[in-house]
Image (spheres, rainbow, N blue to C red):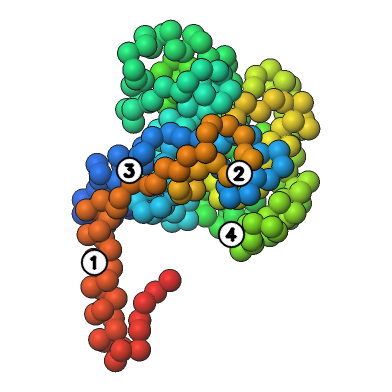
Amino acid sequence: MRSWWREISGLLLPAECEGCGAPRTVLCEECGAALHEPGARQVWPDALPEGLPAVWAATVYADQPRAVLLAHKERGALGLARPLGEALAGAVYAAVRGGGGGGAPETRRPEGTITPTTPHSTLASTLPPFLLVPVPSSRRAVAARGHDATRRLALAAAADLRRDGLSVRAAAVLRQRRVVADQSGLGARDRPANLSGALTAVRGADRLLGAAPVVLVDDLMTTGASLAAAARAVEDAGGRVLAAAVVGGPAPLRRPAGGPGAPATAIRGPRPSPCVERAAEQAAEQASGRDVESGGQGGSRR
């Protein structure tokens, strides 16, 4: 019921951009483009948890992308699923080509066009069929939000990749088998222990996982603990993990000492756009107004 109401209200009620607050649009062109900048890259957490596969991110988890991801996940802005799914699809494509399928990753434009000029059918034919397996959220979190945000993004990404001719399907075959603490409230050292043994494959998933390799997907990566736990659950069920893909990754994009993959280079995130700067200025003005109204006691909200 809640999901249905959000779909209808998104069509009928006045909207503003979830990335910067620009009027009359759920996602402005500039914030939509920010979901694909600086382009899909392999990313690493500060400390590598055991069993973490190669992870590719569409963008840096900051500024507009962070605001858009939170709006979709926590506030149920379901109209953002498609643009976020397209961004995730770009990371998946790079992961399969560069991380699991071999060869250098091609760049995939937001609208699905693959560059450079390699024929569309040729690129699709070089990739094996594979599964997108979302990292599961707890039933309590899904119920509180009114939707399963990661599963929704996996479905949107799979649909976008199929439009490019790839043989891929989303399969929510993992679940939490015990109650875990909210990862956001834990430090990097506590997160792996919190998820140790917590994820498992659903009954009958071994057939599906044995038929095609897996790309794990999530909305973002911070410590990598969730992706590492999901990888172990897939492998315990007889599956093979090619790589992982997320919309938002850590910044700067870099490889920690001793980490696997490409040479250790730091790539700074894009400079905040005028769109973000405008939103920040508006927020500062509003905060200043609240301070005056409250007699200088500070009225900011969290």
Q: What label does residue 266 carry, if any?
A: none
Q: In this view, does 28 lie to the left or right of 52?
A: left
Q: Which residue is the site of mark 4?
A: 184
Q: Which residue is the site of mark 3?
A: 34
Q: Return the residue nearer the eye: 160 or 272.
A: 272
Q: Which amino acid type corresponds to the residue marked 1 in the rendered image?
A: Gln
Q: In this view, does 298 lie above or below 177?
A: below
Q: Which amino acid type corresponds to the residue marked 2 in the rendered image?
A: Ala
Label 2, label 4: how far apart the Cα atoms are: 25 Å
Label 1, label 4: how far apart the Cα atoms are: 28 Å
Q: In which quarter of the image is residue 189?
A: bottom right
Marks 2 and 3: which is nearer the front? 2
- x and y, in percent, of residue 38 in the image: 36, 39
Secondary structure beneath label 4: helix
Label 1, label 3: how far apart the Cα atoms are: 20 Å
Secondary structure beneath label 1: helix
Q: Which residue is the site of mark 1?
A: 282
The residue at 39%/46% (across/down) is 268
- x and y, in percent, of residue 260 in the image: 62, 34
Q: Return the residue nearer the eye: 49 or 245.
A: 49
- Pointer 3 local density, CA inside 10 Å: few below 14, some 14–19, many at least 20: many
Instruction: Give the mark nearest the N terminus, 2 or 3.
Output: 3
Q: What label does residue 257 carry, if any?
A: 2
Marks 1 and 2: which is nearer the front? 2
Secondary structure beneath label 2: loop
Label 4, label 3: how far apart the Cα atoms are: 24 Å
Secondary structure beneath label 3: helix
The residue at 55%/18% (across/down) is 102
Evaluate whether residue 99 shows in this view. yes
Q: Which amino acid type corresponds to the residue marked 4 in the rendered image?
A: Ser
Evaluate whether residue 7 shows in this view. no
